[in-house]
Amino acid sequence: MRSVLKSYVPALLVASLSLVATGVASAADLLDRIREKGEIVIASEARYPPFEYVENGKIVGYGVDLFDEVMKALPGVKVNRLDLPFQGLLPGLQTDKFDAIITSVTVNKQRYDTYRLSLPLADASFAYVKRKGDAALNTPEDLSGKNVGTQAGSAQLKGTEAFSEHLKASGKDPIASIQTYVDFNEAYADLAAGRTDAVVNSLPNLLYLETQRGDVFETVKTTFGAPTYFSWAYRKDDDSKSLADLIDDQFRKLAADGTMAKLQQKWFGFTMDLPTDALPVPQE
């Protein structure tokens, strides 16, 4: 009996150590796995200047520069950036196709409740752009009875729909039609061609557009709807928490040392006063 027991002890020890090792491996969270692999897989929509867009075959923009600064906290980790249509980003995050969405996700209540969202990286309040010299459009209320374009599946679409209802409730005609596009460049092309009257987007994007094509477009700078922000998005689970916390901590450092303001000045021509304690809870 003693010899039989002796032969089992090493086997039991190996099995126990194997279980412990498996438990340790399974306990590692997303940030641990990123460090171990030496790679983070992120998703962006590189058709949203000046946040992310393609120039000379390379993805550039405010969000790219900001993430480069954040990644200084993860030396030795390379970035694998996937360029995808915006409509596929949030579903892809939920199905683990990438580690995080590092592109401009407009904060709303449904997204706040479903995803872990970063501290604000920019203002995302809604405004609209018109053809230069269009004297019929000067305030948000002037969208009453007009044809308006925006991006399919976006917070700007929801905001435009809500504003149309607001116009109707206040006794004005609602927006005549809301046309949706895969990306904003298509909407701007229709606006320039006279196929729509205005395009709703976030104010920083429209101000940037005006700097690039001020001969064609003019931004109506009065915003509408509740103040809102752009964030990056993660899965709302314990596995992603340490990665999200690390990035928020980097945002606080970059805001405190002036780096974030310098990047905003570079890409937008102005700086933004953003909260750094916590992401404000959206009401809608």
Image (cartoon, helix red, strand yellow):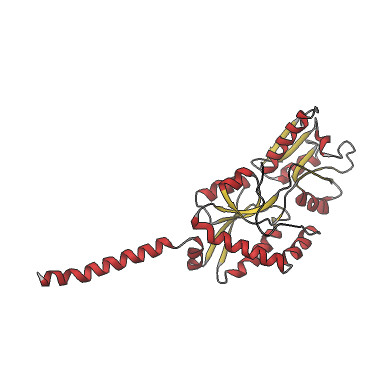
In percent of width and height, residue 137 lies at 86, 38
Quadrant (top left, top right, bottom left, bottom right) of the N terminus: bottom left
Total marks in image: 0
On the image, which quarter does residue 2 sit in? bottom left
Is residue 89 depicted above or below 197 in this figure? below
In percent of width and height, residue 190 lies at 76, 39
In percent of width and height, residue 18 lies at 31, 66
> Is residue 80 something that shows in the picture?
no
Q: Is residue 55 left or right of residue 10?
A: right
Q: Is residue 113 left or right of residue 201?
A: left
**Between 68 and 162, the one nearer to me in the picture:** 162
Q: Is residue 101 left or right of residue 276?
A: left
In percent of width and height, residue 46 lies at 66, 53
Q: Is residue 112 left or right of residue 35?
A: right
**Between 250 and 156, the one nearer to me in the picture:** 250
Instruction: Tell me what residue is drawn at x 61 percent, y 62 percent.
Output: 247
Instruction: Tell me what residue is drawn at x 22 percent, y 71 percent.
Output: 10
> Is residue 43 something that shows in the picture?
yes
Is residue 177 depicted above or below 23 in this figure? above
Quadrant (top left, top right, bottom left, bottom right) of the C terminus: top right
Instruction: Tell me what residue is drawn at x 63 percent, y 65 percent.
Output: 250
Determine the residue located farthest toward the left in the rendered image.
Answer: 1
